[in-house]
Image: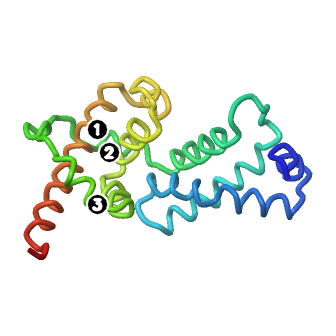
């Protein structure tokens, strides 16, 4: 079944087409939702909300550009709606003087994808959202500020703080790895 046929079937509310769309894209969209969620159950709820939104808005897809990209944007926007905007206002702005400490590449390469995702999920909500939007999704600070209703400077500072926290956690994991590895 072609992508266009699948989309048209979903618009007609053909159950088999909807299940096929889920089968093809749920895994990737769940990984997007997991980046914004605090835990796996919340990510699964976000995924469900994402598909509800996809099926509701599918008739608006204009076949201009990538369908996969459109699906990814729906997942990001749905996840962002879940985030509490007021959490950004409560977080202190400032830069830790140790933020520019380098992390050796082998420290990162020793981590699995699952460990990296867990480190990102453990970030405070504001930091996690901005880290995902800037680093993973590639949005500019201006675009992030517009989407979240915050200042660009807040976006920049939150990203610096998120990176700082992740660097410290990676360094701690690296230290633990080297202390406990067999010789």
Q: Which mark is residue 127?
A: 2
- Quick one: label 3 or label 2, which is nearer the N terminus? 3
Spatial CA span between label 3 and label 2: 21 Å
Who is closer to the viewer here, 63 or 82? 63
The quarter of the picture where residue 27 lies is bottom right
Contact? badges 1 and 2 (CB < 8 Å): yes
Could you tell me which residue is drawn at 19 percent across and 48 percent down? Answer: 167
Q: Residue at x 56, y 65 (%)?
A: 44
Q: Position of residue 160 (x, y in %)?
A: 24, 36
Q: Is residue 28 above or below residue 164?
A: below
- Percent across and percent down for residue 151 are 36, 26
Q: Is residue 56 above or below residue 150?
A: below
**For numbered disc 2, what is the local secondary structure?**
helix
Q: CA distance from mark 1 to mark 2?
A: 5 Å
User: With 133 as the anchor, is 57 left or right in this view?
Assistant: right
Residue hosting label 3? 111
Give how far apart the Cα atoms at labels 1 and 3 are: 24 Å
Res. 76 image quadrant: top right
């Amino acid at each position: 079944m072609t992508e266009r046929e699948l989309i048209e079937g979903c618009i007609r509310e053909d159950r088999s087409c909807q299940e096929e769309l889920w089968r093809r894209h749920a895994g990737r969209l769940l990984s997007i939702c997991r980046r914004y969620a605090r835990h796996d159950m919340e990510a699964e709820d976000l995924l469900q909300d994402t598909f509800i939104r996809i099926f509701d808005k599918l008739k608006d897809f204009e076949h201009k550009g990538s369908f996969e990209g459109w699906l990814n944007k729906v997942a990001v926007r749905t996840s962002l709606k879940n985030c509490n905007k007021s959490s950004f206002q409560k977080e202190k702005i400032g830069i830790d003087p140790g933020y520019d400490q380098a992390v050796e590449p082998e420290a990162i390469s020793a981590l699995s994808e699952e460990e990296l995702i867990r480190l990102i999920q453990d970030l405070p909500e504001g930091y996690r959202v901005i880290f995902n939007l800037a680093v993973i999704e590639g949005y500019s600070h201006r675009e992030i500020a517009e989407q979240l209703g915050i200042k660009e400077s807040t976006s920049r500072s939150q990203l610096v703080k998120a990176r700082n926290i992740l660097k410290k956690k990676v360094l701690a994991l690296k230290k633990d790895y080297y202390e406990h590895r067999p010789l």
